């Protein structure tokens, strides 16, 4: 918080009690010193699912934010504020929009100058609404639904590609693969979890697929907490698409991959679009051989940037596990918020908001040019990459400037 200002009447009363005529004479100099003193700390907060079904992802993101804060503090804190240290306050949405809103209110009440969150689009939708009403900057770590930033908000910003970009690039990558490999792809199926997240991407996928001349044979929605997808996968098997496309979270993504193999679904490709499992470093460990050759069009890091390796090494050393892609975006979103605080040179939320709007951050580890925001708060250069699991690890196959290897397409038959 900025240096506390003392009202003249309060100061004179205090000076009188102290019997300090000399202090009264020295009032202008002392008041100037108090008014311009720097804050000792700058509070920021985050809201993620730290318990419940998405606790794995939420805590990975919390750790990434922690790492980013620790790096800034170790490097001298906010230099424009005299080296003030960042203090991170945690908020647990428990996967609930209502709980997320309550946590946003609590954190703002505790003096945060900016918020980060929230992994689930439904939670981000309502927490950004709270932030807008309370005039508090909110940098989205992960939350893809377009609707979040299509309400004329001024205080919310998103680093990752939105649902429209995810779907558009997903279909573009698929048609590129078909063309370069000489493989005919005419039909697809869509299967997505049924919240705002999956439905938003599913709507866009259907539209972009149609524009690309792809026929959607089945569109299936399901609850992410489901324990069985046999019925849904059997529908896909019966439809016999060229490529099956899936959007969902980690646990259901693993379940889908296993079920595709168990039911021996024969397709030319299995493609995730913003899938929480298919590009996760734990996917192969959980899904086993069923993960091999699975593709995902998703937000990701830049694998050819040497700085990326340093960040990943520090995360592994600090938390004892590999850094996931959603953790990467939590890390980068935190750096974006702190960069704005540094440039604002203030803990005033309006000044930080204005600095965010002028962001032009080149020093990052994402597969894109500089991070800049448009009038809606969308990152104008955000784009997903196309990954494929090879040898148990997700590898970038498109676009070529970030690729690590060539795609296997069509994939071997699933047995």
Image: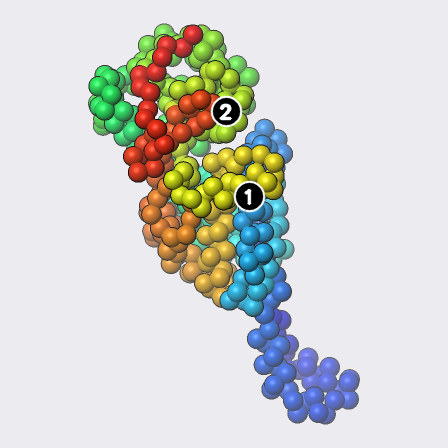
- Give me the residue at 38% from left, 58% from top: 358
Q: Position of residue 143 (x, y in %)?
A: 45, 39
Question: How far from the left and from the top, in percent, is residue 54?
Answer: 56, 31
Work out which quarter of the rendered image holds the N terminus and state it. bottom right
Q: Counting residues from the N terminus, which is met first, the one under dot 1 or under dot 2?
A: 2
Image coordinates of residue 99 in percent, x first then y, are: 60, 40
Around disc 2, counting alpha carbons within 10 Å, would you say few (fewer than 14), some (14 to 19), or many (20 or more)? many
Q: Residue at x 71, y 92 (%)?
A: 22
Q: Is residue 291 left or right of residue 166?
A: right
Which dot, 1 or 2, sits closer to the camera? 1
Q: Nearer the viewer, residue 135 or 32?
A: 32
Q: Residue at x 77, y 85 (%)?
A: 18
Residue ID for mark 2: 283
Q: Which residue is mark 1?
A: 314
Can residue 119 be spotted in the picture? no
Q: Residue, x 56% and y 61% (percent of image)?
A: 76
Which quarter of the rendered picture does the C terminus lie within? Answer: top left
Tell me the distance, in whole angstroms, between the alpha carbons under discs 1 and 2: 21 Å
Q: Is residue 7 visible?
A: yes
For residue 169, above or below residue 190 = below
């Amino acid at each position: 918080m900025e240096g506390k200002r003392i009202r003249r009447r309060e100061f004179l009363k205090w000076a009188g009690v102290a019997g300090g005529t000399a202090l009264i004479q020295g009032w202008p100099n002392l008041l100037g010193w108090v008014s311009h003193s720097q804050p000792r700390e700058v509070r920021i907060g985050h809201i993620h699912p730290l318990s419940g079904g998405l606790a794995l992802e939420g805590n990975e993101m919390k750790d990434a934010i922690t790492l980013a804060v620790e790096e800034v503090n170790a490097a001298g804190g906010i230099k424009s504020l005299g080296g003030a240290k960042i203090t991170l306050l945690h908020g647990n949405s428990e996967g609930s929009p209502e709980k997320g809103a309550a946590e946003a209110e609590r954190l703002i009440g505790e003096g945060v100058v900016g918020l980060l969150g929230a992994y689930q689009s439904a939670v981000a939708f309502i927490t950004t609404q709270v932030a807008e009403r309370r005039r508090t900057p909110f940098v989205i770590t992960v939350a893809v639904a377009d609707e979040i930033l299509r309400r004329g908000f001024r205080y919310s910003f998103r680093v990752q590609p939105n649902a429209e970009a995810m779907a558009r690039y997903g279909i573009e990558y698929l048609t590129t693969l078909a063309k370069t490999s000489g493989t005919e792809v005419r039909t697809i199926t869509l299967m997505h979890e049924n919240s705002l997240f999956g439905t938003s991407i599913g709507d866009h996928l259907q539209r972009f697929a149609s524009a690309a001349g792809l026929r959607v044979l089945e569109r299936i929605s399901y609850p992410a907490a489901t324990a069985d997808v046999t019925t849904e996968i059997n529908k896909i098997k019966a439809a016999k698409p060229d490529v099956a496309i899936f959007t969902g979270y980690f646990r259901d993504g693993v379940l889908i991959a296993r079920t595709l193999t168990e039911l021996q679904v024969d397709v030319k490709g299995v493609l995730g679009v913003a899938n929480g499992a298919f590009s996760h470093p734990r996917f192969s460990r959980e899904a086993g051989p069923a993960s091999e050759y699975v593709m995902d069009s998703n937000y990701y890091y830049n694998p050819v940037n040497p700085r990326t390796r340093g960040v990943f090494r520090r995360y592994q050393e600090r938390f004892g596990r590999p850094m996931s892609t959603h953790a990467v975006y939590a890390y980068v979103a935190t750096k974006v918020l702190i960069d704005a605080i540094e440039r604002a040179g203030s803990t005033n939320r309006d000044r930080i908001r204005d600095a965010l709007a002028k962001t032009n951050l080149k020093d990052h580890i994402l597969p894109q040019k500089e991070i800049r925001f448009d009038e809606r708060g969308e990152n104008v250069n955000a784009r997903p990459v196309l990954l494929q699991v090879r040898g148990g690890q997700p590898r970038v196959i498109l676009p070529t400037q970030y690729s690590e290897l060539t795609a296997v397409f069509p994939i071997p038959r699933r047995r």
